[in-house]
Amino acid sequence: MNNYKPYEFTLEQVKTWVGISTKTRSNDEIITNILKVLYTCGLIEYRMIDKIDNTTNFGNIKTMF
C-alpha cells in the first residue's frame, strides 16, 4: 500500500476505517496489538511519533504512526 512510501496515520483513523468506536480510548489496545503482530510477522514497519496539530488554536500534540 502507498507504493512502499511512508504513510502517517492515527489510531482514530484506523478505528474509523475498521468500524470500531472512536469515542473511547479503551479499544486502542486492540489496534496497537494488531500493529504489533503485523510488525512481528514482518508485514509492516511502524513507529510512534508526536506531532503538533495545527488544526486547532491550541497546538495539541497528536500521536501518529
Image: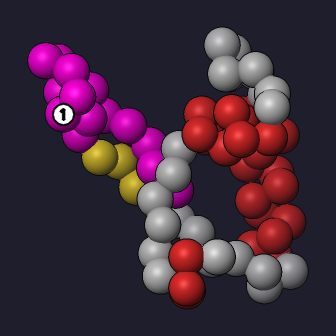
Quadrant (top left, top right, bottom left, bottom right) of the N terminus:
bottom right
Task: Give percent across and percent down for residue 18.
Answer: 80, 40
Magenta run includes residue 61: yes
The answer, for residue 29, to whether it is visible in the render is: no
Q: Nearer the viewer, residue 18 or 48?
A: 18
Residue 51 lies left or right of residue 23; in this view the side is left
Residue 31, compared with residue 47, is above or below; it is above
Residue 17 lies left or right of residue 59; in this view the side is right
Q: Residue at x 82, y 51 (%)?
A: 33
Q: Residue at x 55, y 85 (%)?
A: 3
Magenta run includes residue 18: no
The answer, for residue 9, to whether it is visible in the render is: yes
Residue hosting label 1: 54
Amino acid type of the residue tagged 1 in the rendering? Asn
Which region of the structure is painted magenta?
A: 52-65
Task: Give percent across and percent down for residue 31.
Answer: 77, 44
